[in-house]
Amino acid sequence: MLDTRAMTVEDDDEPDDAGEIRRIIAPPDAAGQRVDQWLVAAWPDLSRARIQGLIGQGRLSADGAAVPRAAEKAAPGAVYALVLPPPEPAAPTPEAIPLTVVFEDAHLIVIDKPAGMAVHPAPGSMRGTLVNALLAHCAETLSGVGGVARPGIVHRIDKDTTGLVVAAKSDAAHRGLAKLFARHQLDRAYYAIVRGAPHPRSGTLETRIARSRDDRKKFAVVRDPESDAGKTAITHYWTIETFGQRAGESAGHPAAAFVECRLETGRTHQIRVHLAHLGCPIVGDPLYGKGRAFKAISPHAEEAAAAVSAFPRQALHAAVLGFKHPVTNDELRFESPPPADMQALLRVLRTL
């Protein structure tokens, strides 16, 4: 049976804050003490009941191994790590934020989301989110399956990614949409403007993606083929258009490209990670777009380089969303053209 208690699909979104991790080495005088008693003395801001509850949730480890019981004796010299979850967010409040509504009925609503709007409240983006706007727009009709902080939310796109998002207004729609996402029974296409171009120009990338060991905000392709770390991620891509010639490279190396990606899975940052892995990171991507400067062989190279450098976000747009209505069974398909900022960048790149 499908578990709908936490049915929010990871869909090219920023990872959630995992909270605080505290580490401490047990001193010699901790020998013989219950681990919960010793930790209360070490961290007086945490109550004993709080520490016991966290241990019961499997959030305490010693040298990497879970501590099963609060009554365990502390092991001098062991490194203890306690994972504190982030504070539970307060229930979001309605905010009268204008929305571009593409489709709406009694069961669901499809929004064309602008850049800069987070899908749901999270540390750093507690107000001005799509959830805040939907609470005002839909009043009391949003599905409650997603929980207090994420009413109606079935999938997510990154705060600075634009485009189509569907939200559930009824619990029946929420459960039905969750099943479609879990079974990959949706048509989803994204447009991206990238530095360079993928090679080959079209194909399918199937990898495992895991959180980066070096930066918790980032994800990375698991390069060890024998590893079972991370989750399988499948992206189909096509190069729609290429622009110019990259300086310092032989013929056949475009300076930039306009790429369509279709998701078979929906992992956090999947498109951003996969395009960077192909050697063509998305223009403006603050996490995965770092690298050599944009350089092209063209009389308009300087203007293009300035436009690429000044682009304020990742140039990624959720352009197509198609699915069978989970309640009426109608076939629905929505398209959204690239937003004005991406179209302006494309016009400059076409001068190369």
Image (tube, rainbow, N blue to C red):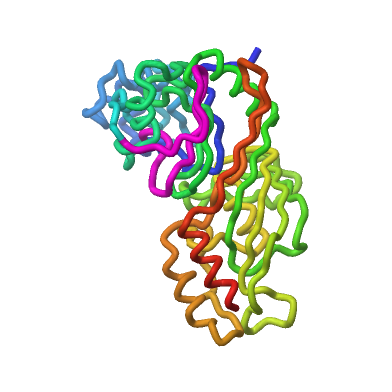
Q: What stretch is highlighted in magenta?
A: 97-121
- Residue placed at 67% from the left, 73% from the top? 254
Q: Is residue 249 above or below residue 164?
A: below
Most distant residue in the left direction: 44
| Left or right: 227, with 269 as reference point | right
Magenta part mainly helix, strand or loop? loop
Residue 110 part of the magenta-drawn span: yes
Name the residue located 69 percent from the left edge and 31 percent from the top edge: 184
Task: Where is residue 341? Give x, y as percent.
Answer: 46, 59
* Residue 233: quarter of image: top right
The location of residue 265, given as percent across then percent down, is 66, 38
Residue 212 % position (x, y): 54, 49
**Residue at 33 percent of width and 40 percent of height:** 125
- The image quadrant where one finds the C terminus is bottom right
> Residue 316: x, y in percent?
54, 53
Nearer to the camera, 250 or 21: 250
The answer to whether residue 247 is visible is yes
Classify residue 97 by image quadrant.
top left
Asked if one can make out residue 6 in the rendered structure from this viewpoint, the answer is no
| Residue at image location 46% in from the left, 32% down from the top | 62
Quadrant in which the N terminus is drawn: top right
